[in-house]
Amino acid sequence: MKDEIKQEYFDIVDENNKPTSQKVTRYEAHTKGLWHRTVHVYLFRKMNDDIEFLVHLRAKTKDLNPNKWDTRFGGHLKSGETIEESVSGELRDEIGLTLEPSNLIQGEILKRDKFPNREFTNVYYYKFQDELSSLSFNDGEVQEVKWMKSLDILKSLAENSEIWSASKNGFSEILTTLQSKL
């Protein structure tokens, strides 16, 4: 699997998120600090006055943050792929979800410079209204999923940050943005 990851190709963008027409492997992008694009999709549901997020335990074989809990699904845009194709494809591949466009809310584009991993992340929120049993995990990237209340996620991020791939501040910003859009 790690060799397959190294062979994925990304379209490179500049520090202003403009395409450069350069195409490199995932490995090159992550080792040379080249800017590229990703998508993050937060699955949520409203329960009474609270927002719950579908969190998942990342596979032990992931190259970034293996075996940690994550608040989002998604991944890198492959070379030639549009943002919309990536959102739909990541949800289908990771959790077997067929995207219902009317449940998708566009968020912000975040510039994330964690050299050598430099990304422009297109954030989306997806109102998931089905049963968890409707999801399937065929690509080996997800070990387990569960619903968590937003306040419980924030508490766990503060008290047990080492088990999460996200930061408390980052998740707080995501939650605030979603609340402003509902």
Image: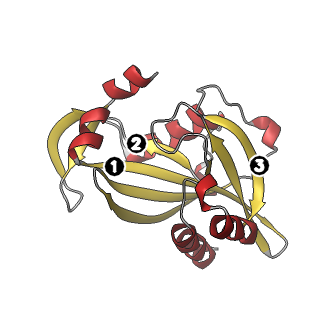
Give the mark nearest the N terminus, 3 or 1. Answer: 1
Q: Which mark is residue 37?
A: 1
> Residue 148, how many percent across, how many down?
76, 59
- Mark-to-mark CA distance, 3 and 1: 27 Å
Three-letter code for the amino acid on which mark 2 is drawn: His
Label 2 crowd bin: few (<14), some (14–19), many (20+), radius 10 Å:
many
The reply to whether the C-beta atoms of the residues labelled 2 and 1 are less than 8 Å apart is yes
- Give the residue at mark 2: 76
Q: Residue at x 64, y 36 (%)?
A: 142
Give the mark nearest the N terminus, 2 or 3. Answer: 2
Residue 102 shows in the view: no
154 vs 135: above or below: below
- Give the residue at mark 3: 146
> Residue 70, how many percent across, how many down?
60, 51
Quarter of the C terminus within the rendering: bottom right
Residue 108 shows in the view: yes
